[in-house]
């Protein structure tokens, strides 16, 4: 009788020990995460006076975006990440209607490249790990096919985001992310009719994306 009870107990203990790594420690200190992603970029607007291409306010159209994030976990909670991403969008006339409606008249092409560094804070280390992230870096704006001659510019960008990591096993998972970007454009010294002078212009964008996690 003792033998019959002992063997099942030993088998159950062995199974629990084998399965323990799959349920715990999905995010481990001193590990690297590679996260390719793809998503939707929600373009902001270029205020009047923010660039030399247009004498009016224009929008950056919504478009698909893609890139990769490379992270290093100093601890289970703290991660440093570098992001490189690209979006091929268009300049369009400003549409004051539904933000989810069709864009306005196309005025030219615009490529947006981000190269940013982030501090990412993970909450937990099991299969599902929510996080917030704060970063800064540069944005490359590459206009083309515009009526006026254009040139590339590089501007400072700040970013804030949040998301969730879903680990299917310790070395592989899925990632869902939402973040915003704010890019400095210029300082307009022109005084408006409402006595507003020295306005600082920013391009603000949003992004929703999903991707993979390769951890080792």
Image (tube, rainbow, N blue to C red):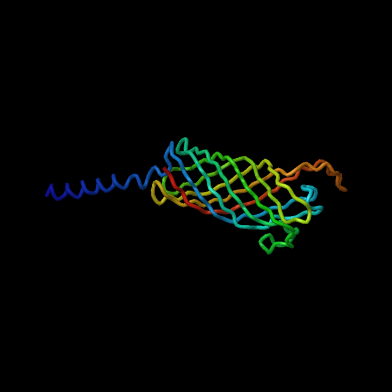
Q: Position of residue 208 (x, y in %)?
A: 58, 54
Residue drawn 68% across the image and 43% down it: 154
For the residue pair 130 and 37, the one nearer the viewer reads as: 37
Residue drawn 43% across the image and 45% down it: 215
**Which quarter of the image is occupied by the C terminus?**
top left
Q: Position of residue 66 (x, y in %)?
A: 56, 53
Quadrant of res 125: top left
Looking at the image, the residue that sits furthest to the bottom is 102
Residue drawn 62% across the image and 54% down it: 41
Q: Position of residue 152 (x, y in %)?
A: 70, 46
Answer with left or right where residue 84 lies relative to residue 148: left
Position of residue 73 relative to residue 88, above or below, is above
Answer with left or right where residue 103 lies relative to residue 48: left
Q: Position of residue 16 (x, y in %)?
A: 28, 47
For the residue pair 56 and 98, the one nearer the viewer reads as: 56
Looking at the image, the residue that sits furthest to the right is 193
For the residue pair 161 and 35, the one nearer the viewer reads as: 35
Residue drawn 16% across the image and 49% down it: 5
Q: How many marks?
A: 0
């Amino acid at each position: 009788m003792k033998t019959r009870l002992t063997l099942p107990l030993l088998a159950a203990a062995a199974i629990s020990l084998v399965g323990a790594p799959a349920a715990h420690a999905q995010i481990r200190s001193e590990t690297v995460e590679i996260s390719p992603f793809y998503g939707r970029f929600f373009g902001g607007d270029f205020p009047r006076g923010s660039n030399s291409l247009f004498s009016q306010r224009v929008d950056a159209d919504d478009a698909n975006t893609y890139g990769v994030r490379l992270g290093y976990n100093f601890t289970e909670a703290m991660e440093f990440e570098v992001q490189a991403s690209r979006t091929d969008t268009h300049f369009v006339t400003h549409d004051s209607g539904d933000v989810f409606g069709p864009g306005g008249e196309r005025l030219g092409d615009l490529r947006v490249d981000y190269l940013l560094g982030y501090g990412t804070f993970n909450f937990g280390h099991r299969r599902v790990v929510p996080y917030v992230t704060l970063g800064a870096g540069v944005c490359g704006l590459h206009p083309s096919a515009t009526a006026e001659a254009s040139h590339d510019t590089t501007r400072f960008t700040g970013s804030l985001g949040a998301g969730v990591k879903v680990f299917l096993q310790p070395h592989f998972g899925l990632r869902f992310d939402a973040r915003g970007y704010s890019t400095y454009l210029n300082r307009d010294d022109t005084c408006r009719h409402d006595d507003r002078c020295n306005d600082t212009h920013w391009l603000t964008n949003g992004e929703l994306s999903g991707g993979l996690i390769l951890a080792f």
